[in-house]
Amino acid sequence: MYNPKDIIDIIAGNVRKTRNPFGIPKSLVNRWHHGLDLPRQGEAMLFTGLMYQFAPYIEKSTHYLAKYEDTTVAEYIRFAKLVPSTLSGLGLSMITPGVEKKKSNVILQNIARILKASEVDFFYRPDLDDYSGVLLYDLGDQESFVRHARYVAGKLKTAGIKHLITVDPHTTYALKVLFPKYVGADFEVTTYFELTHFQSQNGHRRITLHDPCFYGRYLELSDVPKKILAGLDIECVPIRNAGLFTNCCGGPAESISPKLSDEVGNRRLKELNLTGEKIVAMCPICLGNLRKTGADVEDLSTVIAGQL
């Protein structure tokens, strides 16, 4: 295990200096919308929180953290905060495979397709789409989280944004629960799957749907995607430990202890594999952690978009 304070200091420093935990310029991270000609005005703004965009970088950085965990090299991780954030961010961007970045982009493009098919009046403003800071809160750095949340909420309020459509559980929880509690910023927050509404005759499927902790335990939204899928003739096979009692995928512990994260993820994978059906996740962290354990897993948006 790494010293948690060392990891937190690195992440907090990057967020403070570059507004994201990896120090990568947003222009490099957030490219999924290029060429889509999405509207810039509408009833609700699509807010990705950059979590799916960060997924390939999380996987790459975790690979190196796992390699040196519990070795003498781990003691020197604290010096990483002395490296300029943008420099380390550019380095991470260069060594992260482009094919993985494209996979994350496709997920977000699918979500845009789903919203269009559901005739949702949405728009996208990449200049207003920022990281929520939720990892800082998860790791216990409340002060840094509040500072960053004020910045994000301030931009949205200045632009007159009132209704946000989210795509992942971590950002959804931050905007729905943490922003009102800690910075007094109230937005109408709706997940994209709550707005999914179209007909499909593409055939019956059975899947194993993994509930992320934030949707299952804290926001109690687990039943919504299951109803949406049922309407598309996709059956969610019952599994042990779902909804309010769902088991964790192992994240975001991977930033502190990849070994612990793998242990938790493998335990969850054993439960999911009992059904014998395709595993489906609805969170970029869950998606990455389950894949890391060797699971054949796809994102919820991919399943829904496949019915279009």
Image: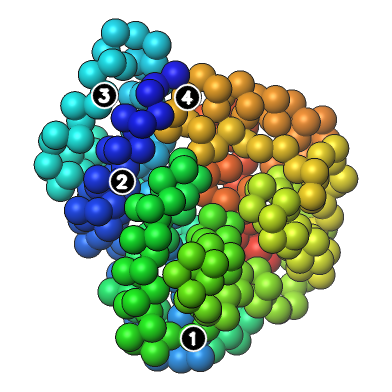
- Whether tag 2 and tag 4 are in contact, CB under 8 A, the answer is no
Q: What residue is pinned by disc 3?
A: 77
**Label 4, label 1: how far apart the Cα atoms are:** 38 Å
Q: Earlier along the polypeptide chain: callout 3 or callout 1? A: 3
Nearer to us: label 1 or label 2: 2
Please tell me whether mark 4 or mark 3 is closer to you in this view.
3
Question: Secondary structure under badge 3?
Answer: helix
Chain-order first, disc 4 or disc 1: 1
Determine the residue positioned at 33% across, 24% down. 64
**As drawn, which residue projects farthest toward the top?**
72
Q: Nearer the viewer, mark 2 or mark 4?
A: 2
Label 1 amino acid?
Lys
Could you tell me the amino acid type at mark 4?
Answer: Pro
Spatial distance from mark 3 to mark 2, Cα to Cα? Answer: 14 Å
Task: Give residue 47's position: percent from left, percent from top.
Answer: 45, 71
Q: Quick check: can you spot residue 156?
A: yes
- Residue denoted by label 4: 258
Q: Which amino acid does label 2 sit on?
A: Ala
Residue underneath mark 2: 12
Q: Distance between the residues labelled 4 and 3?
A: 14 Å
Q: Is mark 2 on a helix, strand or loop?
A: helix
Q: Few, some or many C-alpha atoms within 10 Å of disc 1 (few <14, some 14-19, many ≥20)?
A: some
Q: Residues within 10 Å of mark 2 (few under 14, many from 20)?
A: many
Residue 162 is tagged as 1
Dot 3 amino acid type: Ile
Expressed as whole percent of the image width and height from the top left, the position of residue 258 reads: 47, 24
Q: How far apart are the alpha carbons under marks 3 and 1?
A: 41 Å
